Image (tube, rainbow, N blue to C red):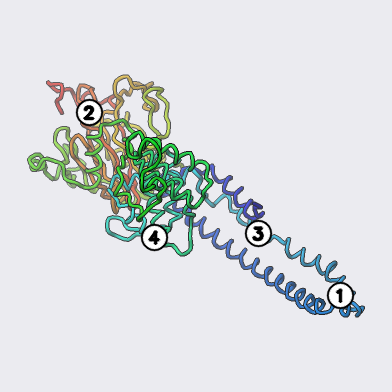
Amino acid sequence: MVVPIYLSALILILQCHAACGEIFSSLADMEGLVSTEFELMKQLDNYIQEEEIRLKRLRGFLEEYENNHHEASEDVSKYLANPLNAYLLVKRLTSDWKKVEGVMTQNAGTAFMINITQHRGVLYFPSEEDLNGAAVALMRLQDTYKLDTHALANGDLLGKKYSRQLTAGDCWELGRQSYNNGDHYHTVLWMGEALNKWDDESNKTVTRNEILEYLAFSTFKQGNVKEALQLTNELLKIVPYHQRAIGNKKHYEDVLRQLGVIPEHGKTDDSSSDDGMSEPFNTANLKLKKPSPTSGISNDHWDKYEKLCRGEKLMDPKIEGHLRCRYVTNDDPYFFIQPLKMEEAFLKPLLVIYHDVIFDEEIETVKKLAHPRFKRTTVVNSATGKLETAKYRISKAAFLKNEEHHHVLKMSRRVGAITGLDMSTAEDLQICNYGIGGHYEPHFDYARKNETIIGLNNDSGWRNRIATWLFYMSDVEAGGATVFPALNVALWPQKGSAAFWYNLFPNGEGNELTRHAACPVLTGSKWVANKWIHEKNQEFRRPCGLTVDAET
């Protein structure tokens, strides 16, 4: 296949911008893609207009050649007997044809690609990694919030229509990305949806055999051998000499013989081994198994996590009945005139929410300071102690020092005033923005025993993270809760509020009940800022109690 020059140039530009990468992990970064799309639309429209003018000229040449050829073909000898006709024929096939060749070889695309190239510094192009990350995020949302595949493909989220319908080709691509990740569960769901949409499409966006090839094998990998054989037979009706399908068909038949579904010698009497699909494909008729959690937590803990993310009430009403909201001063004179609004989310361990503790002007300041420095968030590999990206934490972040802006300093001082802790051993303010399905699976903020920690100022003797303060800097339309599965607690983002809890008992031991997670953002953009406060200098601000699990 010959690739046009303008397409090759576009591919080069896409490759040049692949370095931007991981755009999917932050909605703030993804906003730039809208400008990229607009610029490409404008350049493409200009290119098409130029091409239409060029094609119009070529049609004019063609009409002239057709008229002259028609006249000459009626009586070639008579036509050529006229010296003018003979001259014009030679002219048409020499100098005139050179003009045609010149128009044919004109490449308006090159000029337009130069214009796009000049915008390299301001245009963002997603990479293949972004495409895969966006697809995985949709799968995550689908599982966490129990979104129906068909409804999601029709643009519906929790009963509300948010976008246009997906085509069969769109669903096929989601299935392909899942397949490339070794996720056959979602491959079956999305290839099945692609197959059913394909039947209804007048303008096909993908071929039926492309869908069947992925769907059949993934259906087999999910343990549905008979259905995989039917799908493979359907594929062989379209492409009879498909070598991989022929090999798979034999394998599936062997498996079914071992299971006693097909007689040991030959086929069943009704030749069902060669039958394709007798009715529309329906994943509800299959036995499908979801992938296991990636972060190594128990299925029961994971089930709780997802239920809390969906807003299901799990807390014992007796425990919830003891929780209160009240005004407090925390014995700080600064709050005597304007007390703090405190809401108890749990009592032991103490988990509280303070309302109206960060202001719009401060939020805008830290967002503007952080955005240009955003990098994909990392986690510490417990085995190597090195920082690395992970699929179970999808967001972008940047750290701000107190001296960078008086708003940052004020926020840090406010945290110290409210908590009563020494902020000189607190980490810099971390600003986080979550992208498509952005989340952070259940984790601890403190370093557990035998874990090697990097970046926590251990060289200065700060020791472990005693407490976490979490500012919510945006409302989130759907999803994005902070949940504590062991406590059956879900905190929902509310702009201007902040959550606070101690990660450690007063004796320095980690409190495993503080394991928490950031639920995937379903719709909206989630902005948070957090301060991790360390043990050093807190000895007299939070002294040990008389028992191991004493809270104060």
* Residue 330 visible: yes
The tag on residue 88 is: 1
Q: What residue is pinned by disc 4? A: 165
Of tags 1 and 2, the one toward the viewer is 1
Residue 368 as seen in the image, left or right of residue 84 = left
> What crowding class fits label 3: few (fewer than 14 Cα within 10 Å), some (14-19), or many (20 or more)?
many
Do the CB atoms of the residues marked 2 and 3 lie less than 8 Å apart?
no
In three-dimensional space, the C-alpha distance between marks 1 and 4, rounded to whole angstroms, equals 57 Å
Of tags 1 and 3, the one toward the viewer is 1
Q: What residue is pinned by disc 2? A: 512
Of tags 3 and 4, the one toward the viewer is 4
* Residue depicted at 34% across the width and 44% down the height: 140
**Which comes before the other along the chain, label 2 or label 4?**
4
In three-dimensional space, the C-alpha distance between marks 2 and 3, rounded to whole angstroms, equals 61 Å
**Which comes before the other along the chain, label 1 or label 3?**
1
> What crowding class fits label 1: few (fewer than 14 Cα within 10 Å), some (14-19), or many (20 or more)?
some
